[in-house]
Amino acid sequence: MTQAVGMQAAGTASLPPLGSLPLARGTADRGSTFRTTPDLFDRLWEEPGTRILHLAQLRAPVQQRRLVLSPVSEVARPENPIYLGSTVEPTPDLPSGTHIVLVQYEEVQPEVSPEESWVTLRDAAAELTPQESGLFVEAVAISNWHATHTHCPRCGQRTDPIDGGWVRRCPADESQHFPRTDPAIIVTVTDEEDRLLLGSSAAWPENRFSTLAGFVEPGESLEAAVIREVEEESGIVVHSPTYLGSQPWPFPASLMLGFTARASHAEPVADGVEIREVRWFTREELFVGLREERLSVASGASIARALIENWYGGPLDEEPSAGRP
């Protein structure tokens, strides 16, 4: 446990420019060795300090800005629980080292918590503590993986969860399969006037804009993905991609890697497929458009919002600083 705390402190000291993002604040010890313990869940259900995180339709119960973490004695053991790890930071009701287990349901369970208290990760992440936000992110991510990777990709046989729910094993060929994370870049593009390039997806309302993003392709570096995706979606050639920070985005299984890059020219052309419209914004144009509700941008829980605010120089509801475009 001491090692986990040391790792946490070191990570905090070396945060990238975007700082601690809402979905990237997890502090739990995931227990990669402990999760392989024989009869793991027998032991966890016998340990009175174990707590249960509930998930139904990717929603968890939150009351008074805290996750509902039930004592194990109140929860019947399901067929396939998942071990999420143990707490690192003590709270008034949970000492450090408390084991957390994920239990999933097809429907919301009113007997656990009133139906209105079950909320999505996007709704709750920013208001939860870093430790609980991290547990919620982890629960949603691993739940999504199990839901979409139920069969062996080699032979089609249904696989069985092992190692606390972090591996699926094929009973036919004994192959093991591990959770997947898809890397995706997301980028603020600026020009010589320090304007920001934003695009409107064809799937969004017409007045919604955000930073350009896309998945990293096999055999491709992150920097190459930045250059390729921006040119594909906007026609803009960029240079000098610089890393700013990352955040898990388990909708269903992405890791968003944030960059900024400079445009070599300033004539954007939307691809007309993924992106309906792409345009440059000064800070004043963005501020006025948001204030008058002629524009909308990404929510506070997303790395896109953090990237935009990093360029803007602060919260978007504050007027631009003097001297900025």
Image (spheres, helix red, strand yellow):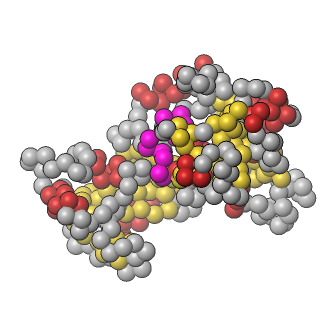
Compared to residue 274, the image places residue 27 above or below, namely above
Identify the residue shown where x is 36% and y is 73%. 205
Q: Quadrant of residue 298?
A: bottom left
Identify the residue shown where x is 80% and y is 33%. 45
Compared to residue 304, the image places residue 205 above or below, namely below
- Quadrant where the C terminus lies? bottom left
Identify the residue shown where x is 24% and y is 65%. 293
Q: Is residue 83 left or right of residue 4?
A: right
- Quadrant where the N terminus lies? top right
Helix, strand or loop for the magenta stretch, by majority? helix
Q: Nearer the viewer, residue 258 or 106?
A: 106
- Residues shaded magenta: 122-135
Q: Is residue 276 left or right of residue 130?
A: left
In magenta segment, residue 270? no
Q: Residue 296: x and y, percent?
A: 30, 63
**How many labels sit on residues?**
0
Looking at this rendering, what residue extends furthest in the left direction?
323
Q: Is residue 46 left or right of residue 63?
A: right
Q: Nearer the viewer, residue 189 or 294?
A: 294
Looking at this rendering, what residue extends furthest in the right direction?
172
Residue 174 in view (yes/no): yes
Q: Quadrant of residue 235?
A: bottom left
Q: Residue 122: x and y, percent?
A: 48, 52
Residue 282 in view (yes/no): no
Looking at this rendering, what residue extends furthest in the top direction?
2
In magenta segment, residue 129? yes
Q: Residue 17: x and y, percent?
A: 34, 40
Q: Residue 288: x and y, percent?
A: 16, 61
